[in-house]
Amino acid sequence: MNLLLINVLLALIWAAVTGQFSFLNIAFGFVLGIFALSVIREQVGSVGYFSRARRVASLLLLFLYELLMSAVRVAITVLSPKMNLKPGIFAYRLKVDRDFEITLLANLITLTPGTLSVDVSDDHQYLYIHAIDCSDPDATRRDIAQGFERKILEAFR
Amino acid sequence: MIDSQNILDTAAVISLALLCLSFALTIFRVIRGPTLPDRILALDMLVATAIGFIAIIGIKTGFTLYVDIAIALGLVGFLATVAFARFIMARGHVREREGHPEEYTLQENSDG
Amino acid sequence: MQSTMPSTTFMVLLLPFFAALFAPVLTRLFKHNAAWILALVPVLMFAHFCGFATQISEGEVVTGGYRWIPAFNVNFSWYIDGLSLTFALLITGIGALIVLYSGGYLKGHAQLGRFFSFILMFMGSMLGLVTSDSFLMFFVFWELTSITSFLLIGFDNKREASRRAALQALVVTGGGGLFLLAGLLLIWNVTGISEMSLLLRSGSGLSDSPYYLAIFILVLGGAFTKSAQFPLHFWLPNAMEAPTPVSAYLHSATMVKAGVYLLMRLNPVLGDTVVWQTVLPLFGGTTLIVGTLLAIRQTDLKLMLAYTTVSSLGLLVMLTGFGSEKAIEAAVLYLVAHSMFKGALFMVAGLVDHGAGTRDVRRLGGLMAAMPITFAAAIASAISMAGLPPFFGFLAKEEIYAALWEPGAWPLLLTLVAIVGNGLMFVIGFVVALKPFLGPRKQALSHAHEGPVLLWLGPVVLALASLGTALFSSLTHHLITSPMSSAVAGTPVEAHISLIPHIGMPLLLSAITVVFGIFAYRQVDRLRSTMFRLLETIGWGPDQGFDQFIRGIVRLSFRVTRIIHSGSLETYMKIIFILVALTILVPMVMFDELPNLPKMPESIVRYDLAIMIIAAIGLFSVVLAKDRLTAIVSLGIQGFAVALIFMLFGAPDLSFTQFMVETLSVVILALVMTRLKLTPTDHRPLHEKIIDIFISVAAATAFMLLLLKTVQVPFDPTLSDFFTRFSLSIAHGANIVNVILVDFRGTDTWGEIAVVMVAGLAILSLIRIRARPAEKIAANDPTDGEG
Amino acid sequence: MASSDKTNIDLSVAMITEAPPLADWLVIAPLLLCMVVGAVLLMIRKETRAQPIVAIPGLVALVIVDAALLLHVMANGPVTMTMGRWLPPFGISFTVDILGALLTLTAGIAALAGGIYGAGDVNDTGRRYGFYPFLFLMMAGVSGAFLTGDIFNLYVWFEVLLISSFGLLILGSERGQIDGATKYAFLNLVATTLFLIATGYLYGIMGTLNMADIARKAPNLTDKAPMMTVVSLYVLAFGMKAAAFPANFWLPASYHTPRVVVSALFAGLLTKVGVYALMRITLLLFPAERDTLAIVIAVVAAATMLLGAMGALAQTDFRRLLGFLVISGIGVMFAGIALASPGGVSGTMFYAVHSMIVMTALYLASGMAARASGGFSIAQPRGLYQSHLLLAAISLILFFAVSGLPPFSGFWPKVILVKASLDVGAWWLAGAILLTGFLTTIAVGRVWLHAYWRPDASDTPAEPVSLSPMRDYLPLILLTGLVVLVGLFPQRILELTQTGSEQLLNPLDYIRSVFPQGEVK
Amino acid sequence: MDSFITILVAAMMVIGSAFTLVAALGLIRLPDVYTRMHAASKAGTLGSGVVLIALGIEAGDTGTLTRALAGVAFFLLTAPISSHLLAKASYAMGYRLSDISVVDEMPKAPEAANTADQ
Amino acid sequence: MEALMTLLVGIFFAIAIYLFLSRHIIRILLGVTILGNAVNLLIFTSGRLTQEIPPILSGNAAAARQMVTANPLPQALILTAIVISFSFFAFLLVLAYRAYQELETDDIEEMRFAEPENQQLPPLGY
Amino acid sequence: MRTLIFRTVAPFLSSLMILFSVFVLLRGHNEPGGGFIGGLIAASAFAIYGIACGVSPVRRALYFHPMTLAGLGLLMSSAAGLLSIFAGVPFMTGLWVDVPLFGDTVALSTVLVFDIGVYFVVVGSITSMLLALEERSSD
Ligand code: NA
Ligand code: NA
């Protein structure tokens, strides 16, 4: 079932990429999708949360907002004549525990300028985050927990 | 009516100038280092800049087919960075000294 | 190409080679008695050639042949005149005796069959040599005699001396052969003739040709090596390492006379010049004297005989070079006589060795009773050798003196040489024939015994032949001597000499020779020790010279090769790029192909210039990078810059591919680097770097100038116009580059993917195949072992 | 996907309208066969037992196809097929004349011998990691190089054979192999790169890549075109590929390192492709430039043959010695190119055929000798004459053949070349050829003395190894038989090479075969 | 409409390029590889992403635009991965944080402990 | 432009050749890549340069069909050459890696197994 | 490099890249791309998959040894060239067929088959090489 979804998704992506939404092309994209997925069949175990499109969209919006804001922040930092940096790495205790969710969270954190996921602890309990401004790690932790992590839990649980 | 080509050309010239400057700075980082990760990062950045460059050229010349090259470049840029990260990992622990080329300890590491 | 019976002659010429193929089988079946069967081959051939005797004695020649290599104007053709016939009869006649003798001599030898093969092949080669008409066929057989004699001399391959002698013979005669080949080809070039018969008939003015001297030297190079003229004589005595039948056959009766045959054959066209008549007697006479002196020194029967062979060859060359009709007649007579007595004496030496177990003359004596037949044959041959009646040698000697006794200092000198030489040969003949047999029997020789019939048949027959030919000299002259002399002289010559001596100068000279000989015979031991001491004092001879030559040429080659092929890739690369620079710059300058100075572009403030600068920065940082990792990353910079350049100049496909390839290159570099424990970079001394910089800048400048010149030539866009025109309309593709790749020039791509595929496989096998156990490799591998 | 823009267009302005006779497919058949069989062998590479079962019939088929092609060319003159139906010079033409066909056939025979020998010599690992695919792809490269009529396509086939040779060279991964392969690879890479560079210049100057097109346009080039320089560059590139002095370092550094069968194939095939290309470029395409360079080529020829023979004299290792003999032979072939007379060129072609066969056979023989007695060093006496008579006999024939002694295959081309040299008064070149023969005789004579005649004096003589009559001796006998046969009956080959040299020296037939209507615009 | 698109495209071009330049500046000015990563792999990606979308808009056909968007999505997908890998690898192999760093809660490999700054 | 490009090609060649002359295989390998680029640029320049008009006859480029497009043939040739040189580069790289493993050096002066430094003089006897 | 984050994302990235590679392959005749570039992208995809998840999953996913794919590719390309013998035209002549399918037409051609062959060769060879390098001294 999940595979089918992904497959359809791939077919649509194909159509989008080729810019030709004819039936034939989508069908062809579907076949290609089978091919592409068959390559990774082992890794595709349980991925199927497509129904929560709305919450995903909300997550996306948050992400885009954060992305833009932080980009500007970093730009200002870089452009300011005297950079007042307090960088550092702090550990973040994860609430999410599925691989997919951890990955998504880590990536979102990374994509947001100012923070960068360095590693996940071996027991998947902690995410180590490098922040360009580490003057108040707890505040950052709170932001993440209230922001991305909560949204992820909403979207995929 | 605005002369759209004129605007685009001006924007392109400005953009290309900015990008060339970016190129220069990035290359400085590649050459200067000082550490290998710095260089790799700079190379990654170089790829990103090149993508922008290609896109600008695409707009400037009207050949939108360049978009595919840009995509492919993003793809392989990723690949290069992954490979280099793997290389750093595989090469083993490093003891770094300011202003000196890197020295490698003999001990081996496994990645995880 | 008309002839009486070409096909029979052809088959006769090939017969020994076929026989050689079957000899081992026959020998396995019949042991040494196969000799009786195999001897039929030369007997048959002898009979065949006898059939020509009357015809040729009437002044005719027998020719025939087949077209062999018409494209190169080479025929398999034979030309039989008096000269060839005599040789053919000697080769086949003595050959038959030798085959029988071999059967006896090598009885029980494990490789007797092989020996028969070799000797039959040798016989065939020699026969081919003397009957060949076309130059190249002659040369083929000439070289074949060298090859077969190489095998025969080295027959006893386990002994170093044999091997050395074989190589020596091959090197000397083979080397001479190359001179001969050049000479023959030069004659061909000068006259346009490539056949003996035509050459002899043409009366061509070869001796007036500006190339005469070159031809003369080249031909002599062949003849003198083959016929062991001083100072190239040394290989012949060494060839005595071969089994005695070989010595008897090759080194007396036949092969060594190939050189003489050559001189005699070409005498009509090359002779009769001052050079010819000076050089030949000079070398011949020297060889005669040196040969006899060296022979005196020997104690081994075979070696003594071998050195006298050298001197006999010298005598023959001297006579041939002397050039007068009588001299030629004398040479012919002596050649025939020598073949008989020397063949016999060698076989006698073998018999003595066989019967008594040694050939050392100092340890031999008193064998007469034990080996009466051998003794008889020996004494008869020795008498012939000494030039005494009633054997054929006498006739020869008389004729020699008759020929040489002419007014003038030069003939007088040669006469003296002949007397000394003959006298000493007289001595050796009798030493060989008398010393082992007379006197008290040495204790060690108590078991000596006469050999079997296979062994003594040969010498006996030859001795009888020596007697018979002398007794029936007019018949001999009619059938053999006169036709041969005519052939050599190029004009009809009649020989008359017989056993009945004419009182005159020749007889007197003979008498002087005999007296000198007897005197010398009595002093032979003193002579020997004198010679011995003399040679000790000199301490060097061409024989050692040969060793020095081989060692020298090997050492020289070794040094030269080590300099050129130093094994250093760095040096190789340096040389290659210096060559590159020279290859481009020298013709450019020499043929005025330098480019014009380029015009400065109007506006150079462009972003493409920026990209070029980036490329250049990337390049320099590759070189200057302090460690190789930086270099690799810098490599990425120049690669991306190139891709951008391609894009800026309208090559998106190239750009696309370059990006991919450049990245993958860097990826693979990184993947491989993980497996290498790197040592820091290039720490060569400055001067080496400066040299490298110089070379690279020179080569790069060369490429650059040529490129500049190339773009200054007007361009012919036909191909690209065509592709642009038909890409969409016929090949259905809008991307012209891709259409070229898969359609217009798809065959290139076909080959290209073959490269990719093979590279993949080659890399796989490189990584997978391990010559050594894995743990050694693991030490270099710092990363995980999973996968 | 495909464009649907298909307006009606007169095809005849762009394409060949008449169908090629089926026989013309012979032009591409050797190449096609090699590529297909090579690909199949690669796909079944893990079926190590099936490899020779597929490969050897494939090689036999290759020889048959090559022979058919040669007969076709002999009957019809140069044959052309332009790929993709595009008019030449736009499509890639394969143009086969006698030179190409004859060398292809000879190469096929050498490959067949190697293929059979490999069945016994190459172990499972070697088969698994591609001995036969490499062999077939190398043959594809060789055949493609001999058959193509397009200079860039020639470059591609050069690369195919080069990379395949890399694969063969490292099949075993021993120290010496890796070291040899390194030098071989880098130096050859430089050589092919020079070829590519020269071709780039050539395209920039002439705007065409088709050889026939080049041949017909070359005489009309303006004086401004830097053709002398470009042709010199070609001579350097091909001289290097052919292992001519002073650019031949790669050969002695590598030929003795791989498996014997690989050395044998290399000796037979690789350098000859360089010689072929040089002949093609200098004789057919740029005769005027060649005339100017003749003296340089002649000096290179003399130096190569003499130094090669000297190199052979200096060796202790039988196989290294053979490598130098390969070089020496190259020098002899260069002599004919320098002379560029009908005799000289036919002599070179003949010598190339001889050298391909005899050098392959010699390497195989050296391998068998080493297997029979445990090593390649001639400093260790090994008494092969006693223990392996047949092998010794064959070796001796090959020794004489390589020295240019009659009545074996090496004799005739040498005589022809000496005569051709004398014809133009180049006595020194003739002398060099003869002296080379002399030195070679000494070199191989010494091998014979030390490795064959000299008895094994060691206390524990090597266990006599029995050599298989089929897998080991068959290829050797096949090649040696040819050596003898060609030596005894050189007429057919000589006729061929003479016609071939006429075709090279008068390119009209070649050009006509590509452009039957004459000038095409 | 056309002119709006033109201006939009022009603006995006300049903004994107400017972002890239900022990233490059960051690459130069920031003190260690970890902080530089913040600038390079995000501001850089964002910059080129904006320009790429500009190209998609300028092209005026959906195919190109979707491709441009897909491309940007792809960058956004890969950029965090490469940063993560690079950072992790650097840290694990002992490339230390710059001296001005205020906190490091990352567990250290034994060899790294003595060199990495607290 | 061609003159400038020629100069760039010259720099490429100079650097490539300089690297080829090094003692370390890795440096030579870098030279191989650069040489490949040098040759490609050479062929590209040799086929003459045109600015920015790709030889593609569809899409937006169709408008430019009347203009002189860049010469497509050298591009195709270079593509083939790139692919080939990439294959060779990959092979050589792995070869260097194996050489390093087997011979325990990447210094070509120390790689003397095929042609050892102390070569033996061949036997001088018979 | 088998980190959680990378391992989770890599399969999707890889399949996306493979998709893209086919896209590039198929449009190559009309726009930049083609078998070679497509093949390189696909090989990069397998490389990423291999680096992230280990080599054996990739090998299992491919089922055939990559070199076998390469051989198949060469075979396909050769066959595409050889097909023209049946049309009586020289080797490697492009043959085009319009196949009607669901009301649309698809232009199939030997040229396309040839390019797909190129794709397979490149995918096979480069993947084989990358995988062999990635996995250790095993085998
Ligand atoms: Na490259
Ligand atoms: Na391609």
Image (spheres, helix red, strand yellow):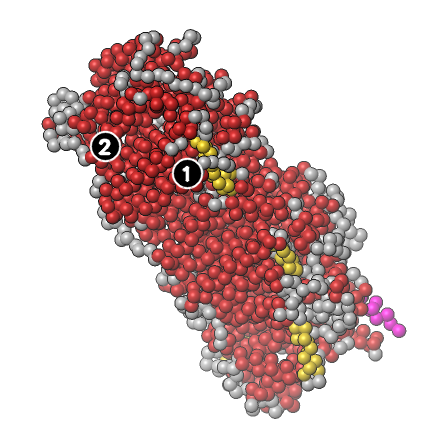
Q: In the image, what residue occupies the spot 79% across and 54% down? A: C603
Q: Indicate the quadrant where residue C31 lies.
A: top left
Residue pointed to by mark 1: C9
At label 1, the amino acid type is Thr
Residue pointed to by mark 2: C457
Q: In terms of secondary structure, where does tag 2 sit? A: helix
Q: Position of residue D512 (x, y in %)?
A: 69, 52
Disc 1 chain ID: C
Q: In the image, what residue occupies the spot 58% across and 60% down? A: D26
Disc 2 chain ID: C
Q: Nearer the viewer, residue D314 or C94?
A: C94
Position of the C terminus of chain G, as image quadrant, is bottom left
At label 2, the amino acid type is Leu
Looking at the image, residue D470 sits to the left or right of residue D488; the answer is left
Q: Is residue E30 visible?
A: no
Q: Position of residue C431 (x, y in %)?
A: 22, 21
Crowd rating for badge 2 (residues with CA inside 10 Å; few <14, some 14–19, many 20+): many
| Whether the residue under disc 1 has CB within 8 Å of ligand 2 | no
Q: In the image, what residue occupies the spot 37% across and 54% down? A: D473
Q: Is residue D9 visible?
A: yes
Q: Nearer the viewer, residue D271 or C351?
A: C351
What segment carries the magenta color? B1-9
